[in-house]
Amino acid sequence: MSKRQFLSGVTFLLLAAAVLWGCSEIAFRNLRVYGGHEGFYDCAPGTVDVVFIGGSMSYAAFSPVELYEKHGISSYNLGTSNQSMLAGYIWALEAGEYHDYKAVVVEALAVSMSHGEIASDIRSLYSMGINHNYLKLAGVYKRNFYKVLFPIFVLHDGWEINEITFKQRVNEDSRYLRGYIPIASEAGEKYRVPLVQGDKSATAYLKFPYLDRLREYCDENGIQLILVKTLMASNEVNYWDDGLHNRLQEYADEYGIPFLDFNTAEYMEAAGLDIATDVAEDLRHMNVSGAGKVTDYMGKYLLQMDNLQIRQFENPQIGSDVIEGYHRIIDEVSSR
Amino acid sequence: MAITSFGFLLMVCAGGALYYILPKSWQWAELLVLSLVFYCLSAEPYTFIYILISTAAAYICTCYADSRRAETDRGRKVAVGLGAGAVLLNVLLWFVLKGAGLWMPLFPKMASMPFVAALGMGYYTLQMISYILDCYWKSIRPQKNPLKLLLFACFFPQMITGPISRYSQLGSLYERHVFSYENLTFGAQRILWGFLKKLVLAERVGILVDAVWSLQAQEPVFLWIAFLLYPIQMYSDFSGCMDIVIGTAEVFGVRLPENFNNPFFSRTIQEFWQRWHITLGTWAKDYVLYPLLKSRGMVRLGNRARKKLGKRYGKFAATSLGMLVLWMVLGIWHGGVNHIVGVSLWYWALLMLGELCAPGLKKLTAFLRVNEDSFSWHLFQSARTYLIYAVGIVFFRADSVGRGMAFLKDLIVGTFTGNLHLEKLFDRSLLQLGLGAADWGILLICVLLLVLAAVLRERDGYARRWVAKQILPFRWFVWLGILLAVVIWGKYGDEYNAVHFIYQIF
Amino acid sequence: MTREEVYERLTGVFRDVFDDDSIEISDETTADDIEDWDSFEHINLVVAVEDEFSFKIPMGKVVTMKNVGEMVDIILDLGR
């Protein structure tokens, strides 16, 4: 093989890699509807005190702007669709590199999805770019590392090339929502029975490998870990019941982690929640009204914690224009 | 391990790199090791014992026949006995393990086959038989190194799907190979092209064909679509696979025989079988048809037929009998009664009919002043061949003869009773068959690409060589385009599907 | 047997097998030159040659012979 041939071969391979990478970028930008967190990197370093992680339950329930407006706490919601505990853990690590945050709130359904779907995990993390945290996925999905490097290999299935393919879609609302996604509909009167009934004998099986890692990371860095299960009305698709509640409670008790389950009568009452009006029509996510109540409750809860020093400071990035924009969006969604 | 999997590509890359680093005299040994690894990753490792048995039988009998001891009268008899025994052993092993579909119905008490067949048994068995016979016919000298013979039986790219190589064609397997940029790039390009055929085209057509076949009552126009597209699926699937296999071997500097030569350009069904699954056809011709027609009994039978029926029909009777046996063997090899009855008999009957009618048709075309060299006449002949082939493989697709017949009946009855409803082609009904509009577009583009490549090949030998003559930006555009098409449009992986999307909006 | 004799007898065989009295053969004649010489007729031809010269052509040679010249060589070789 001549030098020339070698060079042209290598150039071709590099070009192929670049083209595949470009495709991954375009496909990712077009495929995600929610859950891209490019906006997170616009936050000035050291200005986020609380991060929320978890699946769609998380981004539907915790509203950082609401939290700031009512309690002066600066936070960001890093929830993504189908976020597994693995992806949430990696987001927590990533956030730690930019912010000296004090508390991480985990939407507890993520615990039951330890890891396993490479497509979901790639989609949850891809907006951080291919950095050393993102590449932790390659260590988990060893045999499929090439899919982690070139997500087009997993994204191609659902991607059709059409008119939106090459349209740059920037989430303009991310500045106003900080990761939160409002939903307007209501579950309705039919649903008033809570999923968690207080049956102490029920048990379930849960694995905690990535929750363990997150806990250890929090211990090392003096971060308060808080488990929260948001209110749901149905367990047909996403499963939550006494068994899971008890198992997670057991884990929380073992390590002294606060666990707030809004499906229990205790927290439902404390936050003033009502399944019929505070859960969305899909019966799984909290709606705008529920999110407001849960966020408010979380603010109070965080501020009253003894060992937690959360700053209440004026964050120039959440100025009056942001709060105004936020309410405009909420009004728009609610009136739909 | 599927040859379309990433693991296979990785193995080829790593194996290829090692291949050219190792001392040249070790190269064949590395191929053997890779083949063993591939086998263990693809099948139950213990079934490799069948390959060992076949190889050992072939090795022992051919070495004996080549030795001094076989020079005496008695020795010659022993050698022939051993050879016949080895061939019989190969056939029997195959029949018991792989031909279960044929004898199982005779034993209704047996619920399932208690033994697992070896991987690629149909292919290596034929290779071994050809090796033994070639040695006995003195076309080749036997291989004295049993491990090298084993490599011939289980060389990994061709082991699962052929092509069925002759020992004399695979001399390059044991040669010393210097790294060649040409082999590497041509091999890689061929693999890529195979991926396009298999993952983008064949899998898509497969969705359509499956959709039509899985429904009971069907619009005749849909039946026509499945009927006309199934040959394309067969071709792109099988020949795509061959491209991957032959391309992989090329990376290692080994040239495998071609299995396809633009079959749909054939003008007659006879020509078709010389261009489709070529290595199987020539195998059957050389090791079944010729020995049979040359045998004393057949010659005597032919002479008698000639006396009774006259020269022309006597000869015809002899060849048609020989062909019947050949097609039966092919049918049995494909395994299954419907293949024997539906596919084999159909092609045999058509071939014989063609032979009988040839003189008459010749007079007819002369009378009608058909220009036999014109493009349109070629097109007509090719279309006719395509249809004949399509009818036969209906029985390849159907799980029973009855089901195949019912399919053809629905097709014909539906067409001629005025229920064709051609408007269904235009009113978006086609989208019910599992492919969206974009998929139909991709399918069409791929078929056009295949036609283009076939035309180039017919003219220049290899479409790749034509591309290689072009300027660099064009070349790279072509190969990057195919790469992207495979990556984006290929049907592989199932991590991500529409369900994820619907769910993700909440 | 001389080469000429073999050619004379072989031409007769060819004309008989392919039913064409105008066939002329030479060393370079291959299957491409005679329209009906396909894989079928090839074996018929071999059988007819065996019949004419009264010996058996080994299978290995049947598949490998490329033109009439080679066929004549084989015949001369076997007829010795």
Image (spheres, coloured by chain):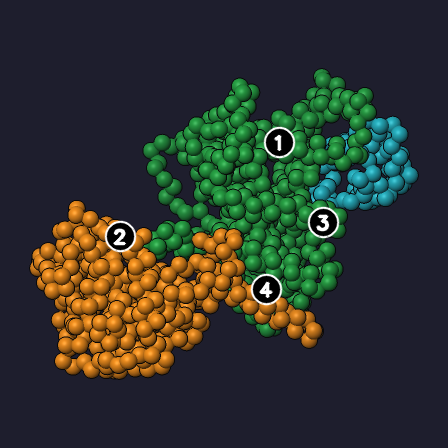
Chain colours: A orange, B green, C cyan
| Residue occupying the point 71% across, 17% down | B308
Which label lies toward us, 3 or 2? Answer: 2
| Residue that badge 1 annotates | B387
Label 4 or label 3, whichever comes before in sequence order: 4
In this figure, what is the number of numbered marks?
Answer: 4
Quarter placement of the N terminus of chain A? bottom right
Tell if the residue under mark 3 belongs to the same chain as the one under mark 2. no
Which residue position holds label 2?
A185
Residue B156 appears in view = no
Question: How far apart, in angstroms, are the residues tagged by discs 2 and 4?
Answer: 68 Å
| Residue C38 drawn at (x, y percent) | 74, 36
Foreground label between 4 and 3: 3
Which image quadrant is residue B381 in? Answer: top right
> Residue flagged by tag 1: what amino acid is it?
Leu
Asked if B21 appears above or below B414 in the picture, the reply is below
Determine the residue positioned at 66% across, 70% down: A8
Report whether mark 2 lies on the same chain as mark 1. Answer: no
Which of the 4 image quarters holds residue A232?
bottom left
Residue lying farthest to the top in this orientation: B308
* Measured Cα–Cα span from mark 2 to mark 1: 58 Å
Residue at the image position 66 percent from the left and 37 percent from the top = B272
Specify whether A212 is left or right of B225: left
Q: Is residue B289 among the parts visible in the rendering? A: yes
User: At which x and y percent is residue A42?
Assistant: 40, 75
- Both marks 3 and 1 on one chain: yes
Which label was assigned to residue B28?
4
* Amino acid, disc 2: Ser
Residue position for label 3? B456
Report in which chain the residue with disc 2 lies: A
Structural distance between the alpha carbons of marks 3 and 1 = 24 Å
Secondary structure type for disc 3 = helix
